[in-house]
Image (cartoon, rainbow, N blue to C red):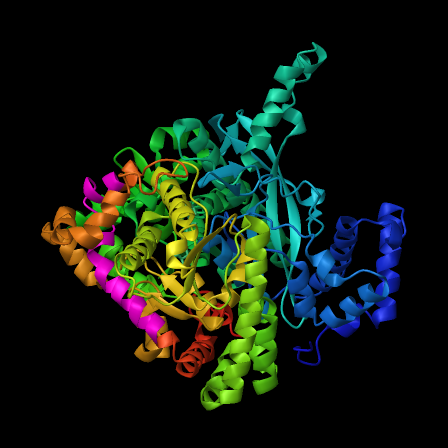
Amino acid sequence: MVIFRSGMARDKIFKDTQDFKEQYRALCVSVLGREFDKCTDKERYSMLARLIAAKSRAIEAECHPKEAKKVYYFSLEFLLGPLLDNYLLNYGLRDLVADGIDEMGSSLDTLIKQEVDPGLGNGGLGRLAACFLDSMAHEGMAGFGNGMRYRYGLFRQEIEDGRQVECTDNWLEGGFPWESRKDGSSVTVRFGGEVVRHQDETGRFWFTQEGGECVRAVPYDVPIVGYGGKTVNKLRLWSAEPCEEDFDLDAFNAGDYARANKFRSDVEAISTILYPNDAGEHGRILRLKQEYLFVSAGLQSILRTYEHEHGHDWDHFADHVCIHTNDTHPAMCGPELMRLLVDVYGLDFDQAFKIASASISYTNHTVMPEALEKWPIETFRHLLPRLYMFIEEVDRRYRENLMREEVNADLLASTAILWDGQVRMANLSIIFSHSVNGVSDLHTSILEQTVLRDFYRLRPQIFNNKTNGVCHRRFLAQANPPYAKLITDAIGTRWLDDATELERLIPFEKDAGFLDAMEAAKKADKERLAAYIEETTQLQVDTNTIFDVQVKRFHAYKRQLLNVFKILDLYNRMLDDPTFKPAPTTFIFSGKAAQSYVLAKEVIRLINSVADVINNDARIEGRLKIAFVPNFAVSNAQLIYPATEISEQISVAGAEASGTSNMKLMMNAALTLGTYDGSNVEISQLVGEKNIKIFGLRAQEVEDLYASGSYFAWNQVNSDPGRLGRIVSMLTDGSLAGLSGNFESIRDYLMAGNDHDLVLKDFYSYVDAWEELTAFYADRHAWNAAALHNTAKAGFFSSDRTIREYMHDIWKIES
Ligand code: F58
């Protein structure tokens, strides 16, 4: 399928198929010492990726002039997903390479399947960072990622007896052909030790941090290929290694290898795993070390480049460099940049603060207070004694300024960095930033009105909204070939560059032929997903049923539980009343729960237990089916989104900052069944109420209900023992216990916990909304037109648009 625009950089990469084959064969021989024909599929994939990576590095080296303003996107997570297919699409090389490989007796699809997902992120925040890298390259800007190269990604999820089991994700086992190690760009990062004051004869003094633990941060660079292939940026991932000077040679010589090696494993632990459990001081210190390591190493590397390109012209640093911090994990960027400018480059404190705050910006991704990071001052100062001095001084001056105006005195408790024995990372981020943004309209206004209200009162001008977006090339063009082809046949290829072109699909909402073809494409996508479900779970699903999908991290506020309650309600009503026939539906769930999040893991077990009961109950004649797809990752997400017809976005209003699966799913012509939360609000405004189903309390109503103290979960249950009460009873009466026991803790969360996420409160409006939406599905023509309208309006949710807004409003870069 040719869905690429002309004039792409591909011609510079391979002259033709013959040229590609020759280069590919030569690489196999030179690296592996074996002919292509003697290589395994894994090796063939690896060599192909290396070939494309090498070409990309060559383009990258010449991409940006030194005057170009550079943006460094600091994020502890980049959920890249597989790269090969995406880069071939971006270069416009897919057909040429596929033909070449066919002629060599293999197939591109076989090789693509060999690629493993680098699991370098948890969920939405990490995937957003990866979409942004893609869009920055697409926009032709010099935008670079800075993150951590975790030896083990987020765990691989398996399901046993309905339970989530966490297995090690050894994603680097077979090597990562996209990366290249840059020993020459290594830097040193120091933890612990003490701060020593030095003074010379003139009275000039300075500080150094000495002793403690010295870590060598080694960068691995991954090329980021923008669509069109003209811009290639890079993602720099840091790995922690011991500094040779710290090696305990005495212990080694004395044969005490355990002691000699201990420091090695302590240091390497820093880049071993993605976000260790928050349990225990040790785990937390490791997390703080990760945060400091990638911040310090990234900034040292930026300063080196700056010095190389602009010398010591520090006054113009912020004209050339933007440092964007993805949530609070890189919050130490501010003080660390100051430390480097003062201690290494000899600037004074005020100048350093000015430079730091003019170059740093911050995105907040959550309104949940428990997610706002805090560190005990003692831990912090012990680990980072010199950095802490800068934080303390900035905080002292901040307080002094605030107290000068009496009206502000009450803002100290909420806005100071140091409070109650803790370093508050969100406050640190904000005080060092010239821009603070939320990720949807609703989220930003909640930040301004509640969570960060006092900061907003003080500096309203730094607050702004940047509604999230997703990479439509990956999640529509690449993930959904039959639909992408249909779109391209209808409106040409420009939508790949400019997603707002999708609006040109609107006239086709009246075109019966187009709508039939669209339904056929959806059917093909459903069949592909059904085959994957069968392969991974041995469950057969019927592609003539509605595919109703909720895929995302498991969290109480996202309310997968509400979805299960709805399914149980439909089931109970079918058993009670043979005339009640809900629309035949396959409910598909996928997602991981954090290792230590007991309730979320119980909800996974509940879904699988309900599936075990319903899927095996002949009385309902296969009308309802539940599939849990294990190990949700970018790669299987790309199979799930295209096959979806109902997109479940049912978080309690006011809790989801934005959500991004809602965007990926609408793009793929799914209708949203959702609350008025996060960017569902903007989806609803764009597609119009005919083309989305909204239910439940609004954010303000939720807040008022909490504030009134008048909500009692028991009232909900007592007022309808036949439906809601019955479902709550089923949690503990043995009806669902067949697979692995009852669900007391879920019942406790609902009843003793007074239904914190208002599952019971929104239950009826949700079930009614589902029934109305599925009734609408029966009108195939109207449904398909509404589904197409969702795709047509999805252009706004391309991360290209989001990045252009960041460029224009925050980074001050013109396209
Ligand atoms: C997510 N946050 C938001 N955090 O929940 C979601 O609404 C939003 O669309 C997305 O960010 C992108 O803005 C999120 O994914 C994390 O994964 C944290 C990582 C660090 C530990 C705590 C969760």
On-image quarter of the C terminus: bottom right
On-image quarter of the N terminus: bottom right
User: In the rendered view, does 509 fall on the left or right side of 678?
Assistant: right
Residue 748 position, x and y percent, is: 24, 39
Residue 374 position, x and y percent, is: 34, 39
User: In the rendered view, does 360 fall on the left or right side of 47?
Assistant: left
Residue 9 position, x and y percent, is: 72, 73
Q: Would you say residue 310 is visible in this rendering?
A: yes
Q: Is residue 155 above or below residue 781?
A: above
Residue closest to the eye, 527 or 256: 527
Residue 678 found in image quarter: bottom left
Q: Would you say residue 325 is visible in this rendering?
A: no
- Residue at 41%, 39% (x, y): give it: 739
Residue 743 position, x and y percent, is: 31, 39
Q: Is 752 contained in the magenta span?
A: yes
- Residue at 61%, 66% (x, y): give it: 67
Numbered disc total: 0
Q: Is residue 118 above or below residue 439?
A: above
User: In the rendered view, does 39 fall on the left or right side of 638?
Assistant: right
- Residue at 84%, 59% (x, y): give it: 24
Q: Range of the magenta residues? A: 747-775
User: In the rendered view, does 432 fall on the left or right side of 48?
Assistant: left
Residue closest to the eye, 768 or 465: 768
Q: Is residue 518 above or below residue 464?
A: below
Residue closest to the eye, 597 or 151: 597
Q: Is 63 contained in the magenta span?
A: no
Residue 107 found in image quarter: bottom right
Residue 89 found in image quarter: bottom right
